[in-house]
Image (spheres, coloured by chain):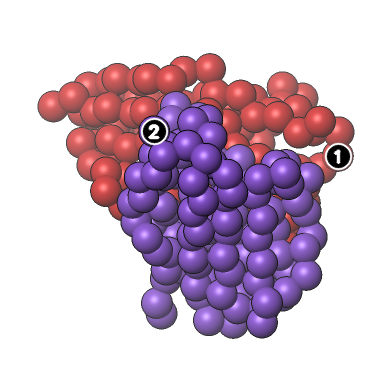
Amino acid sequence: EAGVAQSPRYKIIEKRQSVAFWCNPISGHATLYWYQQILGQGPKLLIQFQNNGVVDDSQLPKDRFSAERLKGVDSTLKIQPAKLEDSAVYLCASSGQDGQSYEQYFGPGTRLTVT
Amino acid sequence: AQRVTQPEKLLSVFKGAPVELKCNYSYSGSPELFWYVQYSRQRLQLLLRHISRESIKGFTADLNKGETSFHLKKPFAQEEDSAMYYCALSGGQGAQKLVFGQGTRLTINP
């Protein structure tokens, strides 16, 4: 089966600019996650969707970050305006019920550099 | 609060030697623990989960609730084990978010 797809793979922007990332989960997976991974740290959840509804966005900086999953499939994550500290890899993951397993499958990530 | 601690950022061992990557956690309920691995130029992938109680690529991990630990072990390291390893925790059954440790970079020397 095809894995989680993300684009772009790399993005360089200046601070105060805006940027958007796209994720296409594995077909049939109801749950989609966006993680932020700052260099030297483990991934940190930003937002979790179940179908097109938000389950957890407690760590999403809502003054500048937004995310949507309008039809319960693809998702976009937007940053506006970007700050230097937003430089990170943004990982998308998806999971679907396989028996009792909810294994998360990760995409390749988008590496964002804010200058 | 959920927290995962991996005390070693870097770990280097020789091929054929035993390896142990440490992971401690804090969680008030009954967590589900995982080890994820990221090989060079590959995406993050699940290595093993404690409920499976299985050995993957020679690695095992036992959940010790008394010590709140989930250390990853392999008796004889191989060069292809060199990678970044992350311990992660979720709140239990169902599709739950993962809380990751900071990761340990394992290098196997020939």
Residue A20 locus on image (x, y percent): 50, 58
Quarter residue B18 falls in: top left
Question: Badge 1, how many Cα within 10 Å: few under 14, some, many 20+?
Answer: few
Q: Nearer the viewer, residue B59 or A87?
A: A87
Residue B81 locus on image (x, y percent): 29, 39
- Amino acid carrying mark 2 in the image: Thr
Residue under the point 60% across and 78% down: A73
Question: In the picture shown, does residue B87 fall above or below B47?
Answer: above
Judge from the rendering whether residue A98 lies leftward or rightward of residue A12; answer left or right: right
The disc numbered 2 marks a residue on which chain? A
Residue under the point 63% across and 65% down: A32
- Quadrant including the N terminus of chain A: bottom left
Chain letter, purple in picture: A
Judge from the rendering whether residue B110 lies leftward or rightward of residue A4; answer left or right: left
Of marks 2 and 1, the one in the foreground: 2
Judge from the rendering whether residue B45 lies leftward or rightward of residue A100; answer left or right: left
- Amino acid carrying mark 1 in the image: Gly
User: Which residue lies under the disc numbered 2?
Assistant: A115
User: Which residue lies under the disc numbered 1?
Assistant: B29
Residue B65 at least partly seen: no
Residue under the point 70% across and 58% down: A48
Q: Pick out the residue farthest to the front.
A: A16
- Quadrant including the C terminus of chain A: top left
- Quick one: SS at disc 1? loop
Color of chain B here? Answer: red
Residue B85 locus on image (x, y percent): 43, 36
Q: Which mark is residue A71?
A: none
